[in-house]
Image (spheres, rainbow, N blue to C red):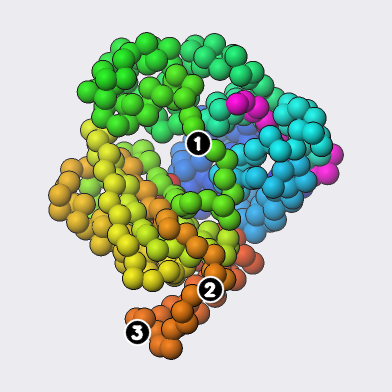
Amino acid sequence: VEQRDRPELRGRPVVVGGSQGRGVVSAASYEARRYGIHSAMPGSRAAQLCPEAVFVRGRIDHYAEVGRQVREIFHRYTPVVQPLSLDEAFLDVKGSIRLFGPAASIGRQIKKAIRDELQLNASVGVAPVKFVAKIASDLNKPDGFVEVQPGEVQTFLDPLPISRLWGVGRVGEKRLTRLGLSTMKDLRMQSKDEMSKWLGSWGVHLWKLASGIDSRSVVSDRKAKQISHERTFHDDISDEEILRAVVSFLCESVARRLRNGGRQCRCVSLKYRREDFKTFARSATLPYETDSTDAVFRTAIGLLEKMRQREPRPVRLVGVSVGSLTSKHAARQPMLFDLEEGDSERRVVDGVVDQLQDKLGSKTIHRGTSHRWVRRGD
């Protein structure tokens, strides 16, 4: 977007953010990435890697508006859009084929519309399996188009490195390499029982993905049975305050999506993966439906504290999800008084925060409890 808006930056290594003090890189152009610069890197390190890099101040509100324009193009072709981030989404186009042609044709039409109307490149992956489409979209960036036919899924996956698997970071890749697994075919050729013995449920999950098995459907927030956010850490974390900050940040994201989608929840769950890849999940049921950040946070923190008492080892992933979703406008018994003291005030605070983030961007305001994590830039 910065190179589009400022022609003098085109073809140059551009870094968004990270230009002052302890600032971190928010995004880097492909010209900058060739020097090893990537998001979440300290700006000082980026400057060392590429002294001629051009640092620009981020404009998150502007990027969010462009993201909204991109999503408007998506919705011309299908109502089933599942956002992954500001600039990425899954689309299910099965119901649109009679109107717009085959899936690949729809992908090319969307790509062309983004180019013609917004002067931006988009990479598209088309596949019958959700995570395969994700991999396909990543292969030939920044202007790629990769289609994987139903009968080609395994042939497409087998030669790819295990680092392409969803959820495999640096630590996970090293552990899989130590087991003699470097490609998806290596992983697929193991038995499911063997993967379970080595890596528990996470190993079975990876085996299924490498085998082209992914039954997850594309769901929009308004149809989702649950809403979740999670973070995998570059380095395992034991610091209790950092873990609390991560959970606070995730609760803010989840509750905001609840409110944006006109939903409320009755269940809060915490996902927790130790450094040895053993994964645990705990849930709690609330006494009433809510979309309050505070209610989700207090419940999730309670689950975290119990989990830390039982499983105090270093952590490599934490996730927060909300379930038992209902429409905010569904009929229910009205409450004469707040269920908890200060509930009305907290709803007002959530409304003000949502307004500020809508106007100024999602990174402009956070709870004090999230600050230590937000400041890290991870």
376 to 214, vertically: above or below: below
Dot 1: element: loop
Residue holding disc 2: 331
182 to 209, vertically: above or below: above
Instruction: Residue 241 in the image: state x and y as whole percent.
Output: 27, 58
Instruction: Residue 131 in the image: state x and y as whole percent.
Output: 52, 30
Give the CA distance from mark 1 to mark 2: 30 Å
Is 120 within the magenta? yes
Q: Which mark is residue 341?
A: 3
In this picture, which residue range is highlighted in magenta? 116-128
**Amino acid type, residue under disc 1 in the picture:** Arg
Residue nearest the observer in this picture, 327 or 363: 327
Give the residue drawn at x 65%, y 39%.
91
Residue holding disc 1: 216
Left or right: 76, with 154 as reference point: right
**Amino acid type, residue under disc 2 in the picture:** Ala
71 to 142, vertically: above or below: below
Give the residue drawn at x 38%, y 41%.
232
